[in-house]
Each structure stands twice: as C-alpha cells, then as structure tokens.
Amino acid sequence: MLFEYAIVGGILLGIFYALLSVGLNVVFGAQKIINLAHGDVIMLGGYAAWELYQTYKISPIISTIIVVPITVVIGYLLNRLIAPRLGKSSDPEMLSLILFFGLSQVIEALSTLVFGNAERSLPINSIPTAPLKLFGESYPADWWVSALVAIPLLAIFLLFLYRSSVGLQVRAVISDSVEAAVAGINARRISGLYFGVGFALAACAGVWGVFIFGGVSPTEGPAITVTAFAIIVFGSLGNPIGTLVAGIIFGIFYQLAQVYVPSWSNLVPYALVIATMLTRPQGLFGRRQRVA
Amino acid sequence: MPKTAEIKTLQNTGSKTKTLISPAIATLVPVIGFALAIHVYSNELLLTYMAIYVALAQGVNIMYGFTGYLPFGYFGFFGVGAYVSGLAMLNYNLPPVVAVIVGGLGGALVGAILSPLFRLRGAYFAIGTLAASEAIYTIVANPSLQSITNGPYGLNLANYYSSGMAYGSAIALVAISIIAVSYVRGSRFGLTLKAIRDDPYSASMAGVNVPRQRFYAWLISAAIAGMAGSIFGWATSVFYPQAVFDSSLSVLAIVFALFGGVGSVWGPTIGAVLLYSVYNAIGISNPEYFQLIYGLVIVLLVLFAPRGLLGFWNFFAQKIRRKRVTND
C-alpha cells in the first residue's frame, strides 16, 4: 500500500514540481540566463496569494490567474534593463548567475523588511478541502488541487509555445536570434516576453507552494532554486517538455524517499543534479551535448 | 586577447626584488594590522571571524580569480574542516593547532573527491558544487549518523578553547592564504591558470596540463577553506551543523572577493575587511539591511564594475600615468 501511495502522491506532487521548475527553464531559454532568483519569484508569488486572500478574500485559484499579467510585465521590464549590458560582457552566462544571485539577495532582504521573518500560511479551507481517495489511500487536498490547477496552466503554456504565432517567433529566437532578427522578428522584444512568461510560471507555482511547502517565508528561495535547477538539468536545459517529465519523475523519487527513508529524502534533489551532471550532462531529453 | 597587465608581469619577472617586495607588503600589512587591531578593539572573536573571512575571500580568489570557476559550494569545505578538526580534537585528543591542519587536509581530500565536477563548465560547475555541499551537509547533519557526527546537535569544543591561540592561527591563515595567492599570481603556475581561464583549448595546445593545474588550484583553495572552518569551529567552541555548512559563508566570501576585485592580491583582503566591518556595524542587529546592501553591491558590480574596487583604482592610476606621459 505504501508503494502505491508513494507513486500516486509522487505523480500529484510531480505535476506541481514541473510547474515549479519550468519557469527556470523558460528564463534560461532565449538568452541563456540562469535565474538564481527563481525561488524568490516563487516566494513573491506565495506572498501575493497570501495578501490577496487575507485582504480581499480572493481564492488562490483566482490569484494564480491574477499574478500572471503582473509578473509578465515585471519580467519583461527587468529583461530589457539587464540584457543589453549582459550581452556586451565576455561571459554572459556566468555574469547572469552572479547578477541574479545579487537580485535574489535584494528580493529576500526587501521581503524580510516588508513581511517579517515569520512563516505565513493560508488556511486549508481557502481551497476545496475534500481529500482525494485512490487505491484505498487518501491524499491531501492541496496535492490534487495544485495538480489540477497546474495541468491547464502547463497545457496553455505548451499551446502558446508550440501552436501560436508568437510561440513560433519565440522558438525561432531560441534557435538563432540573429537569423530570427533577419527574418523580421523583433528578437529583443520576443526574448523579453518569453523571460516574463518564465517569471509568470514561477509566480503561479509560488501561489501553490504556500500549501505544498506548508507556508511561505522570505528565506525559502535558494533551496527552491536548487530543486528547480536539479529538475531542469535532469530533463535537459532549454527543453520545457523534458522539464515536465523530469518534474514527475522527481516527484516520484522524492515521495519514495519520503516513505521509505524519510531522514534522507532531502538528499534527493542534490543527488539527482550531481548524478545527472556527471553521467548524462545533456539530460534525459537532450539531443546535443550542452554542458561539458 | 592581448592582456597588457599580464605581459607586464611577464616582463617584470626579470627584477627579482620587485616581485618579492610587493607580496611581502601585501602579506605583512594585513598580518600586522590584525596583530595591532586586538590592542585597539577588544572583541577578539569578531576579529577572528574577520581574519577567517579574509582567508576565505582569498581562497575564492585562487579559484575564481585565476581559473574562472566560481565555487558556490565553497562552504562545504569550510564545514568539513570544522567537523574533521573538531572530531580529531574530541576523538583523538589532538592539539588544536594540529587539528586545524588536519581539518585543512580534510577539506583538500573532499576537494579531491569532488574533482569530477570539473567536467562541468561555468554556471554548471557553480551549481554543481552548491548541490554537492548541500549533500554533504544533509549527510553530516543526518540524525542517522548521530553516533559519528552527533547529527543535528553539532559539536562542543569548549574544553579546547584558548582565545589567543585561535586568533593567532587565524592570522597565520591570513598570511598563508595571501602568500598562496601571491605565489599563484607571480609564478608560472599562475600564468598557466590564467591561460586556462582565458582559453583552455589554446592552453592545452601550448602544452599546459589543463586538468592537473586546475586540480592543484582547487586543492589549495579547498585546504584554505578547511583550515578556515577548523579555526571557526575552534574559536566558536560550540557549533551546530547549519552554522558551518551555511551557504551564506560562500556567498559572503564571493561578495568580498568580487567587491575588492578578483585576480589581485590586495582586492579580496580590502573587500573582506571593509564589507565585514559594515556587516558588523549594521549586519548583526539588522541583517536584512546588510543583505539588501550586498545584494545591490553585487548587482551594481556586475553591471558597472566587473573588476571590483581595484578595477576602479587601476583605471584611475592608468589615467594619471597616461597624463604624466603626455605632460612629459
């Protein structure tokens, strides 16, 4: 019974983890920027959900939609601000890492000043509360509700990327920004927009992180970033579909560890990222050698 | 890419005295400074921490400044050093100074074990080391290993505490780290490292054994962090695993080194002393304000001054020199 519990629970949580990490991969997408502030954007999404619920009694399901346009705009503006300077440097990837690390510190400090150190959580009755019963086991409501919210979000994202005309431009810019610009695509605007989409996905995940992580606090960012990074490296950098599969596999691994060796379960993301980097650096779905 | 500064160091190696004097000054000034500071400012633990941060910033300098590999997980060696030396004192009753050296060897050993991470480049290496260090932390602090490492409850070294000795060792470590950096900077070894940093393929074509040279730099850097961690544990005397396996240790060391300017001998020393003083002025009562400041410092450095404070200094020094030449 424990085994089925771990697998089903792992898949439910895995869908959430896919949403949690796909934004990092999207931000990496066009300009090879490594967003070390990813976890902090997720944290801000969590605080947004908390504020919206406590002040205006807005359900987290609605908040998930509200945060999207705001974060797209923020991400776009940030990208337009930093991309030109990073592009000029000799090692943009490394510099972006350090830059976003600094940004992550700034966000963490400001949120401590604004929200305080204490962890904040939302009452469980702010979302549907019935636990899911499957194979004789019951799963917490937040697991299946977050999975149920994540699936349409991820589907919309994939439709945007692979079926819309803007998505076509995005993929053109990712594969070759110069060629894309020659073909009349405004490469800067498109990569800025895609960057914003990455932020939006992170913020959406943050809304549900309040439930899955049991609360939101200013210092949670870096650990989430490492987990998300483990998942996107595992599923291949630059490949969003790989991230979705990797997220679910990670969820199952993590739940199995939680069930059978709970004190070692925190090791899972670190072991995953190291093992992937050393044995198959291009990840599960990588075609080209990307890293080493 | 022609680098005038490097060509100059090459030409300068002709005059032996000059290459010996400036590292001697760079080592002696901080050492004498720390030795005198204790008579002016009586908080010895704080000065010990500052010296430890100078050493850590120099250790980061050896790695990032000369090879371009950013060790985000630098705190792993620090924690390993603290634990190895602490356990050596507790289980084998080693004298603390010997235990500190053993801690440094422990750090270097873990560095050797983690050396396959060098297959990764740039940002992947940075995050790979971070994951490795977090993994070490999870293992050391694990309740299942309580019989060996005392798990989440940390170590108690209060019996070995001796105030003057720990501070003296910290100053010695500062000297060691600065000498190591000046050696790396002035030697053939440093030149090969810089060649690797700028273009590993051309360097290996020119006969540089790229993996081996990088490995040596990595070991030196890891040993410095291991000794720094040992002294930290000894001076603090009671510590929990999260205090020595704290990712903000590597964060601060990297910020200090970047702020002063990596690749130089003086930069990390100046950066660590200046910023750590700021940290003590405001960081202990209001850590979030300090975090805000150093976050902004990083952002501004990356965008406007990737060579740090010393970059500014060199920029102006060069301008003045050029003016003099035109005036003559």
Image (cartoon, rainbow, N blue to C red):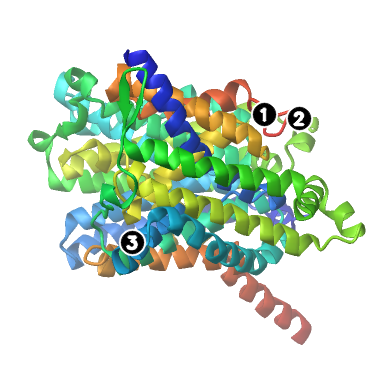
The kind of residue tagged 1 is Gln
First in residue order: circle 3 vs circle 1: 3
> Which of label 3 and label 1 is nearer to you?
3
Query: Measured from the top left, where is residue A196 in percent x and y?
Result: 61, 59
Point out which mark residue A53 bears: 3
First in residue order: circle 2 vs circle 1: 1
Where, by quadrant of the figure, is residue B142 drawn?
top left
2 and 1 marks in contact (CB < 8 Å): yes
Query: Measured from the top left, where is residue A95 in percent x and y?
Result: 61, 54
Residue at 34%, 52% (x, y): give it: A219
Answer yes or no: are tags 3 and 1 on the same subunit.
yes
Q: Of residues A40 and B82, which is closer to you in this image?
A: A40
Q: Which residue is mark 1?
A: A282
Residue at 32%, 18% (x, y): give it: A136
Q: Of residues B164 and B129, which is closer to you in this image?
A: B129
> Which of label 2 and label 3 is nearer to you?
3
**Label 2 chain ID:** A
State whether residue A236 is above or below residue B18: above
The kind of residue tagged 3 is Tyr
